[in-house]
Image (spheres, grey):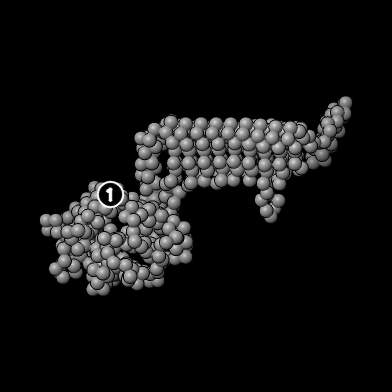
Amino acid sequence: MPVSVIILAAGQGTRMNSDLPKVLHPLAGAPLLAHAMQSAQALSPERMVVVAGHGAEAVEKAAQAHDPAAVMVRQDKQLGTGHAVLQAKDALADVDGNAIVLFGDTPFIQSETLQAMMDARAKHDVVVLGFEPADAKRYGRLVMSGDTLERIVEFKDASDEERAITLCNGGVVAADSATLFDLLSAVTNDNASGEYYLTDIIGIARGHGLSATAVICDEAETQGINTRAELAQAEATLQSRLRAEALDNGVTLTAPDTVFFAHDTAIGRDSVIEPNVVFGPGVTVESGATIRAFSHLEGCHVSQGAIVGPYARLRPGAELSEGSRVGNFVEMKNATLGEGAKVNHLSYIGDASVGTGTNIGAGTITCNYDGVMKHQTTIGERVFIGSNTMLVAPVTVADEAMTASGSVITKDVEEGALAVARARQEVKPGLARKLFKTLRAAKEKRQKEVK
């Protein structure tokens, strides 16, 4: 049957102590909400509905950046999870089949778990996700009779006997869409919090003669993010998982605990990642590349056999071809580096293309910004750019040309030419000693005046 997904993302998250909506706090370079949406994609949903509330405009923008087809609805007053799910009713009025409710602050639900819940729907009207934590704390409890879920009771409303139950509510609920909304219409706010609980639908379903059950998952999957400390713990959990996957895929991490991945980092086998490397979103590193220590990469592509770093920064749009090299204290942005080309020392290459076999000398800068607009620098094949060259864009240096060290290049350089753009050096014999003598005398005079 077709499946629709409802993701609850309306909460303020007051314990985060932040102006940013809770579901937009980043985890491995992506908002918490994006992780929940990515989990849901495993079901190939017919429709995905995101319920926004606090900071709704920002939440909606982030949701549609991840999935432009996502349908946005709002919960203007936060009256509980049951009330939040009801806000999706009109958005799913024309869609038959199952609906599954996820939470935007719970990023670790696995695709296999969601599929197990869908499989259980073949035998039961309502399916809930459950888990057995090491410490049950204040989680809601699942009251079972055999494999039948009789009801869910929130901790604050539970008796001592119910609080002794170790099977807890993971929050995720699946049911036929029409059934889900029918059950929610019968939910009241007669409880300790005065809210409409999504969990109340289980007792209502059982009272109507419908069947309910629980699918059990590992506690780690249900980890919700409510505080900065929990966000930090979630980051540590995810980074451990991503590092283990990289090692299993044949990537060498010489100091795994010091490497930080984004949620979408892709690295080919036999690549080497040295200590203290940070990957932002959108990075692909092909097989056999080396990323040396203390480098930062984001939105870039590193081809087979390329070497980056140490202390290099690749910003969005950086494209490194096979066998190219970007060395220490080099920054690249929106620039391509041809096969075998080298930018080894203390340089900035932005809004530029560098041809095959070209060598960029130390201290070279592409001056790409005029204060209003960005401009392109084009450097051909087998070019030698002398150290401390300023390339004032827009400018082209053609194949097999050369620039003299210390030049400021403002005009195109033709193929095979040498460009020299600097003042002629003059040497004044003895003048340095005279200047030092004058300066020291001035200093002594000033010191006497101060005294």
Q: Residue at x 24, y 72 (%)?
A: 182
- Tell me where residue 226 sits by quadrant: bottom left
Q: Quadrant of the N terminus?
A: bottom left
Left/right placement of residue 253 relative to residue 149 reads right
x and y percent of residue 69 in the render?
42, 61
Q: How crowded is mark 1: few (under 14 residues within 10 Å), some or many (20 or more)?
A: few
x and y percent of residue 148 in the render?
14, 59
**Residue under pointer 1:** 112
Q: Which residue is drawn at 22% across and 55% down?
A: 119
Q: Residue at x 70, y 32 (%)?
A: 400
Left/right placement of residue 446 relative to residue 229 reads right
- Give, as a three-letter code, the residue at label 1: Glu
Q: In this view, does 82 lie above or below 35?
A: below
x and y percent of residue 144 in the render?
15, 58
Q: Which residue is drawn at 40% across and 56% down?
A: 33
On the question of residue 142 being in view, the answer is no
Q: In this view, does 209 lie above or below 383?
A: below
Q: In this view, does 75 lie above or below 307?
A: below
Residue positioned most to the top: 429
Left/right placement of residue 135 relative to residue 267 reads left
Q: Which of 169 and 179 is in front in this view?
A: 179
Q: In which quarter of the image is the C terminus?
A: top right
- Tell me where residue 256 sits by quadrant: top left
Secondary structure of residue under mark 1:
helix
x and y percent of residue 257 in the render?
41, 36
Residue positioned most to the left: 146
Q: Nearer the viewer, residue 47 or 345?
A: 47
Q: In this view, does 206 lie above or below 388?
A: below
Q: Total of numbered circles in the picture?
A: 1
On the question of residue 371 being in view, the answer is yes
